[in-house]
Image (tube, rainbow, N blue to C red):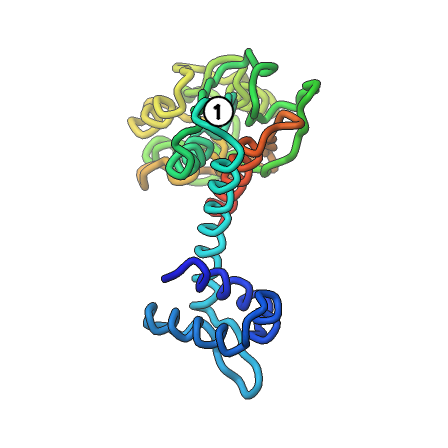
Amino acid sequence: MELLQLTYFCDAALTENFSKTAEKYNVPPSNISQSIKRLEKELSAALFDRRANRVVLNDRGRAFYQQVRQALDLLESAREAAAGHGAEDRLRLVIHVNRRIVMKAVERFQSHCPAVNIFTTHGFSGEQEADLIVSDRVMELPGFSREKLFREAIALAARRDLLPPGDLGADVLRDKPFITMAPGNSVHSLTEAICREMGFAPRIALQSEDPFYIRKCVELGLGLAVVPTFSWKGQFSDQVALYPMGDHSREVYLYRRTGGNTCLEAFCRVLRQEIQAEQA
């Protein structure tokens, strides 16, 4: 499998016209056709359905395109970072929320750009010194732009044997122990706000700065936890059920230092790709 071969395929997947792809890359249409046939032979799968005088991307082709497009984008990010920066480059990340996905993006980025040093913190200070911030807070930070990354629903996590089936009203929940993050974190604020809306104050039995510890305590049946469903997706076993909490949700934002270097832009691209992959 060659890089140029995959580049031809991605363009042809969008145009569904080998002649247009050939024109774009200034090669004969037969080059595109033969390149894609070799790719299909190597994969032992047809990526296009041939119909009279046209080609149509099929289901296998669409699935393959999604993966290849992400890989080519990541390679482009790595090329840009390597071209514009040296061994002393660094990125300073402040991660208020969504640590799991952000750190997956860090891992992917550093696998292609090992010369870039990345420093991460999780506290609510030092934002002005950061290059990038991921937070659910709406903040006015001079020198930063803000974009919404996603909105996620809020649910109640509990071991299945801890709650009775049926409506989970205040009468059921008011005496249950709650496990949450430390004060100042949005999960803690959401826990208090949702319970207050239901007419009671939560009995907080445990709190921690570490999301892993929160999830572990829920798995052990030590209490209930109000959790963000996308950020914590796939982090509980089948022993734990997630119960919807009405229309409650939170938005997660990316704050990026304006006028940032190519390295910062490349990392932002990788982070967006990681989020899109999780949402697929």
Quarter location, residue 142: top right
Q: On the image, numbered disc 1 is attached to which residue? A: 89
Residue 232 shows up from this direction: no
Q: Nearer the viewer, residue 100 or 104?
A: 104
How busy is the neighbourhood of tag 1: few (under 14 within 10 Å), some, or many (20 plus)? Answer: some
Residue drawn at x 44%, y 28% as measured from the top left: 116
How far from the left and from the top, in percent, is residue 191?
A: 52, 22
> Is disc 1 placed on a helix, strand or loop?
loop
How far from the left and from the top, in percent, is residue 52?
A: 55, 88
Q: Nearer the viewer, residue 17 or 240?
A: 17
Examine the rendered structure and indicate whether residue 257 appears above or below residue 53. above
Residue 266 shows up from this direction: yes
Residue drawn at x 44%, y 15% as measured from the top left: 204
The residue furthest left is 220
Amino acid under label 1? Asp
Residue drawn at x 47%, y 26% as measured from the top left: 173
Quarter location, residue 181: top left
How far from the left and from the top, in percent, is residue 23?
A: 61, 70
How far from the left and from the top, in percent, is residue 245?
A: 54, 35
